[in-house]
Image (cartoon, rainbow, N blue to C red):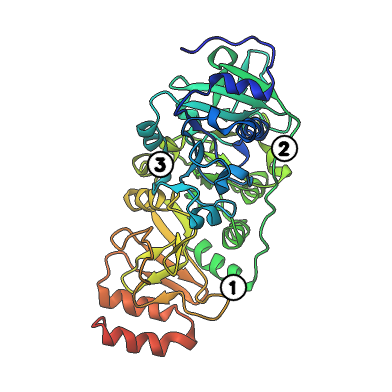
Amino acid sequence: MQTAPSNAPNVPSDVLKHIGPREQLIIPLANGEPTAVLDAIEAAAAEDADRFDEVRVHQMHAIHDRPYLHGEFGTHLKHISYFLSHVTRQPFADGTIGLVPAHFSEVYSLMRMRAEDPLVIAAASPPDQHGYFSLGVSADYTSSFIGRGRFFLEVTDAMPRTFGRNQIHVSQVVGWCQSDRPLVEIMPTASGSTDRRIADLVAERIPDGATIQTGIGAIPNAIMTALTGHKDLGVHTELLSDGVVDLIESGVVTGVRKRLNRTKTVATFALGTHRLHNFLHENTAVELHAVRYVNDPRIIANERNFVSINATLTVDFLGQCASETIDGTYYSSSGGQNDFARGAMYSEGGQGFVVLHSTTSHGMSRIVPQLSVGDVVTTPKNTIDKIVTEWGVAELRGRSIRERTRELIAIAHPDHRESLTEKARLIGYL
């Protein structure tokens, strides 16, 4: 039973009072991770791992490397991932963590399936004068547990106080502590000429007043820059990055033509630099909502002219996009790519862009006749709309397999077009 905490903060190790046998711990993604609390849990496990009886930690996209990720405590304390990061990629390959395939919009419901009475451990901003904490940069799946799970919070002054559906009152938590840990900065990736060419091809197809979703990385950053001449754009995106700040501050993003959350920039988590964190702090123009709302294709479809922009690693002649595996080896997971592709497909005037360089860093074509054995389809052929490389835009929606094949070969690197054509003939696509 949840008991009301004292208004005074606890220490991180007090979380151990709330962890019982087979406890299911829910941790926000990225900077939502409560580092001091997890340090205390691992310290207790290092002293006596037997005190934990098959405790499981559920999280997407961890950015802090930890001993338990590498099987340090066996089955006593184990990580279940819903999206691999640079930190969890090797542990997954080594078999020391689990990975649950999932659309980001459905992660909360999948966690609920595995955890009837979860303990949510999250980083938060200091409580305001009314006694409300903010989950700061990570509403994600965590905010949906407010009122549906026990919460233990780690407060840090570095966490911006954000608005939306991510506040929790002091009376709703079993405990909280304070730490002085900074948030990790993710610096913008520099965009090259290839990224800028792709960005121009996408930007020129986005009308004024559209509502957009894009991610983080060199191509998305270039697209943000390419949109500086647009007017009255809206933002409804899972990830808020520094590039969006530029568009808001310059007046390009106003949200006045949105149907939902008009005038508000909506996201489910933020990842970027301290500039982004400072911009978010007590900024009522930005709202962070639960991912089961933000990424729901049925919600996205309500916006007219919704534009989804996502990156992939490989595309085959059918238009299938393998965005989470490389040569059959898991690299990340589905995330929200398919959520937004479907939402854009159902939006009046919507467009779904999938972007990629035409070749790998080793000169291999990313446009292929067929995906490699073991490659996982993230955006399926029946949902795909437009594929963009630096060589052009392939319009695939409503096209036949032969038409798709011709469109994709036309945007492949010129060095590979002849061999791709020969292979297309061999498999009967041309």
Q: In terms of depth relative to the viewer, which is nearer, 424 or 349? A: 424
Q: Position of residue 38 (x, y in %)?
A: 62, 33
Q: Do the residues bearing badges 2 and 3 touch, measured as CB atoms within 8 Å?
A: no
Q: Amino acid at mark 3?
A: Ser
Q: Position of residue 327 (x, y in %)?
A: 44, 70
**Mark toward the viewer: 1 or 3:** 3
Q: Amino acid at mark 1?
A: Thr
Q: Is residue 206 above or below residue 275?
A: below
**What secondary structure is found at the residue carrying circle 2?**
helix
Q: Residue at x 35, y 51 (%)?
A: 342
Q: In terms of depth relative to the viewer, which is nearer, 148 or 209? A: 148
Of the image marks 1 and 2, the number of the one nearer the N terminus: 1
Of the image marks 2 and 3, the number of the one nearer the N terminus: 3
Q: Amino acid at mark 2?
A: Asn
User: Cα distance, mark 1 to mark 3?
Assistant: 31 Å
**Mark toward the viewer: 2 or 3:** 3
Residue 118 placement, left or right of 373: right
Q: Position of residue 430 (x, y in %)?
A: 26, 84
Q: Tell me the number on the disc at residue 194.
A: 1
Q: Residue at x 38, y 31 (%)?
A: 112
The quadrant where residue 276 appears:
top right
- Kindly tell me whether residue 164 is visible in this rendering: no
Q: Is residue 108 above or below residue 15?
A: below
For label 3, count other residues whose C-alpha is less than 10 Å away and answer few (under 14), some (14-19) or many (20+): many
User: Cα distance, mark 2 to mark 3?
Assistant: 27 Å
Q: Residue at x 49, y 77 (%)?
A: 391
Q: Tell me the number on the disc at residue 278.
A: 2
**Residue picked out by circle 3:** 105
